[in-house]
Image (cartoon, rainbow, N blue to C red):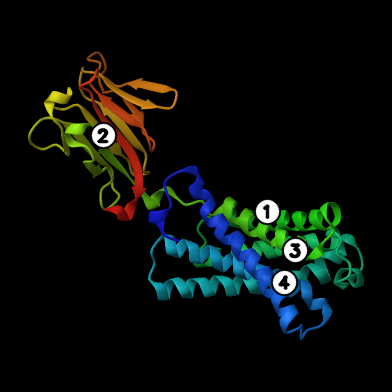
Amino acid sequence: MNIFLVPYTWQRHLQVALITGAAGLLAWWFVMSWFTFFGPFWSLEWDGALFLATCSGMIGGAAVLAEGSLRRRALPSRLALTLTAAGISFGVGFAGYWLWTFALGPALFGAVPDSIDSALVSLRYRLGGFVIAGLGSALGPLVTRKFKGGVTQLLSGAAAGLFGGAVWHLCNFTIYYDLYLASALGAFTWGFGYGVLAWGIPDELYAGWLRVLSPSRYGLRIPVDAMDRSPKERFVGHFPRGLDVWLNAEGQVMELHLSVAVDGEQHYKARGLTLQPTVVRRFLERIDLRYDPRRPAPLETRLSSGDRVVLGQGDQATTLEFIMLPREER
């Protein structure tokens, strides 16, 4: 994955989910291909353990690999973290299957022979294996991330495994009665659900930019964020010295017209610094930020990507646009 190919829209949160969903499908394809071309060298009772463990390892490793690609980590470090996460996820998924089969499942639903019988594909005997394997797919990435976001990651993994098991059961027993394709859809749902719940691309990979859209200086843009990610404020006007964005006075821009600030939590705000019209435009909303002398501080509003700021009024007004671009654009 390349952060430069992921625009700052809500769809960006689906990018990692598609990768982890594809990893689930790849795990299913690998296991099925092994059965087809080589044949199993293990006993029948191991089928479920190896399938769930393979899905868990592939999904966990793919999540870490996608994050490493987005953060542009060095390739050796990226591969080492990916293999570590995949190994941990595989091990937890494999061990968790037997824990459910011989301990938790029989304690809840019945005798051990029913739990280990591979011919019994009822949800009551297999759902716990999916959930524990889902936890495994989250635990591997969690270890490589030094346990950041632990509760969210684990709950997301368990929920994704639960969804995968439910889809597997629904497709096999309700829709088209095909265990072969049901396992494929279950693996994809598991991976996709984990990516959606736990791996949205964070705002910290992007930075705010201010871009001029008026003809006089069309295309001029400056970053709002500081290089060290500390709070920063950028000023716009036609005063000849000391401003971050200089614009022509003919465009109804005052000496000190507008400022755009970012705080330590990456929240962006626009502040009106003049009595002349300063309007922030977004969908179904217009916000007038012109300075009110009766107030001790200038009016301000929060900015989001795509907002436009109009300085002045009429045909000669100057238009700026606030956009979010990958931080490495600098």
Hey, what amino acid is under mark 2?
Answer: Leu
Question: Alpha-carbon distance for marks 2 and 4?
Answer: 55 Å
Q: What residue did someone put label 1 on?
A: 159
Hey, what amino acid is under mark 1?
Answer: Ala
Question: Alpha-carbon distance for marks 2 and 1?
Answer: 45 Å
Total residue callouts: 4
Q: What residue did someone put label 2 on?
A: 213
Q: Whole-percent x and y of residue 328?
A: 31, 56
Q: What residue did someone put label 4 on?
A: 51
Identify whether 150 is placed above or below 283: below
Could you tell me if the residues under marks 4 and 3 are in contact, i.e. CB atoms within 8 Å?
yes
Question: Alpha-carbon distance for marks 1 and 3?
Answer: 17 Å
Q: Residue at x 53, y 74 (%)?
A: 84
Front-lying residue, 89 or 23: 23
Local packing at callout 3 (Cα closer than 10 Å; few below 14, some 14-19, many 20+) is: many
Q: Quadrant of residue 8?
A: top left
**Is 251 situated left or right of 119 in this image?**
left
Question: Alpha-carbon distance for marks 1 and 4?
Answer: 18 Å
Front-lying residue, 79 or 219: 219
Q: What residue did someone put label 3 on?
A: 183
Could you tell me if the residues under marks 1 and 3 are in contact, i.e. CB atoms within 8 Å?
no
Q: Whole-percent x and y of residue 3?
A: 40, 56
Quarter of the rendering occupied by the N terminus? bottom left
- Front of the two marks 1 and 4: 4
